[in-house]
Image (cartoon, rainbow, N blue to C red):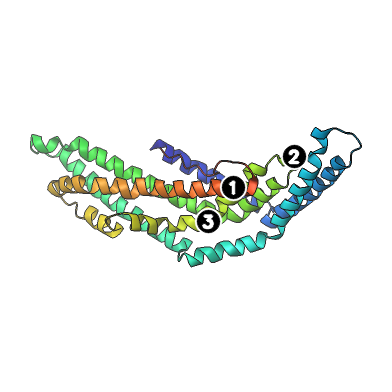
Amino acid sequence: MDCIRNNSVLINNLSSFTSGIMSSGYSPFYILYIAMNIATLTYAVGTLFYGLPIPIYGLKKWGPRMMSDAIYAAVWVNIYGIIIFAIGQIQSLLGVDWSSFFSSILQLQANMFSALIQVKSLYYIITTEKISMALALLADPVLQFSSFITDIIFLLQFFIDLGEFIQQSYMILIAIGILLLSLPFRMGKGVGGTLISSAIIFYIGLPYLPIFMQEMSSITLSQIGSQLSTITDVNTLVETIAGVVPELVIVFIIIPMLYLSILAGISLGLGNAIGGSSGRVPFPLDLF
């Protein structure tokens, strides 16, 4: 789970980078202004190549390509406001918002913190008090269980960091993607398309994650929290570890990774449609 901590650091660095861009005066609309100027330059260079009196097909073929790419980028610049509006409307139709996302994840994290404190307390009792040898053998499993809960807390914090980054930076990410689309010779078309699609898909879909976790699990998240809260002594600890660990693995690891993989797959497909080539999701999702 060290990669979860590293990815959380990377998300924070990305947030600092985009915040630095915006605080430096480079708003999304200024980036779009630059993109429009570059698209105009790309169109001018394309017309120059198209009209060259040199019969070199490898050079002249770039003329109509660059002209069409410039028009394509200009269309994206002009529909930027429509895209931002449509993103908000689609999210509203799904019945989710960022406030409910953060509150749900923070509540789960609070439940995990409470369970961690109780498990740590029982581990201290097992290792310091004079108890039977049979109970002393539980020290290692209890320690492993507390480490597992700690990893879940870090994973939930990663979801929070990722959500904050997308919520605060999706507009500028889309603008940077359009800027990459406008570059001549299709230098940034694939990356730009993936950047646009990832910002759109994750802004719409990530707030639905707590609901997806709830719908896909056989036990409600509140029931898991109540089970963890019943840890008061060694006997209930053994019963809880045996019963709740499989559910924790499914609810907090398998289901979220499945959902993030779905969002990443949709982002790559849409990015391929926008940019004409495959790319990579700009968020660090390789947690394992």
Q: Nearer the viewer, residue 159 or 220?
A: 220
Q: Closer to the observer: label 1 or label 3?
A: 1
> For residue 4, what is the image quadrant?
top left
Distance in Å between CA atoms under marks 1 and 3:
15 Å
> For residue 14, what is the image quadrant?
top right
Q: Are marks 1 and 3 in contact (CB under 8 Å)?
A: no
Report whether 36 appears left or right of 80. right
Provide the secondary structure element on which disc 2 rests. Answer: helix
Q: Are marks 3 and 2 in contact (CB under 8 Å)?
A: no
Identify the residue under disc 1: 271
Report whether 111 appears left or right of 83. left
| Amino acid residing under circle 1 | Gly
Identify the residue under disc 3: 203
Seen in the picture, residue 230 relative to 241 is either above or below; the reply is: below
**First reached walking from the N terminus: tag 3 or tag 2:** 2
Identify the residue under disc 2: 185
**First reached walking from the N terminus: tag 1 or tag 2:** 2
